[in-house]
Amino acid sequence: MALSEIQKQKFLEISGTEYTESELKGQFQTQRAYNDKEWEKYSPWFFTFVIEPETGNLICELEHRMTNNRIFGWDIKGKELSDEVKEKYFKPHW
């Protein structure tokens, strides 16, 4: 399942990296959290994503050892997903 154009844009906005894979899940370190080059001078964040094959939903987590994790999710039209859907994959660290 490929991401929609709006999901690809959201992926880039959060991870600072363009989505080019055809994988349904993955994790990598990013020096450009929120696609902000100012973050490059700090320690990297972990970006983890899951694409639901049956719905096409994109759910992702941005995590750093110095702060709480952030969970995001969008359907194929770019509508934000409910916490219930997002928390099937990632739990908030408060």
Image (tube, rainbow, N blue to C red):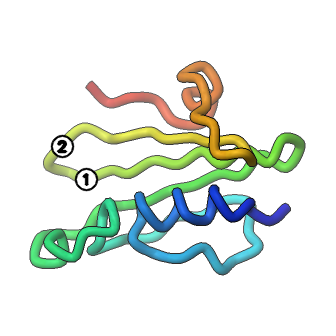
Q: Quarter of the image for the N terminus: give it.
A: bottom right
* Residue indicated by mark 1: 64
* Residue found 63% across the figure and 57% down from its top: 7
Q: Assess disc 1: are there few (<14), some (14-19) or many (≥20) residues with their C-alpha within 10 Å of its C-alpha.
A: some
Separation (CA) of disc 2 from disc 1: 6 Å
Q: Are marks 2 and 1 in contact (CB under 8 Å)?
A: yes
Looking at the image, is 15 positioned above or below residue 52?
below
Is 73 on the left-hand or right-hand side of 45? Answer: right
Instruction: Give the camera-side residue of 78 and 66.
Output: 78
Looking at the image, is 74 positioned above or below residue 11?
above
**Residue 94, image quadrant:** top left
Q: Assess disc 2: are there few (<14), some (14-19) or many (≥20) residues with their C-alpha within 10 Å of its C-alpha.
A: few
Position in image of residue 72 (x %, y %): 49, 41
Looking at the image, is 88 positioned above or below residue 66?
above
Q: Residue 34 carries which label?
A: none
* Residue found 85% across the figure and 49% down from its top: 53
* Residue found 36% across the figure and 40% down from its top: 70
* Kind of residue indicated by mark 1: His
* Residue indicated by mark 2: 67
* Kind of residue indicated by mark 2: Thr
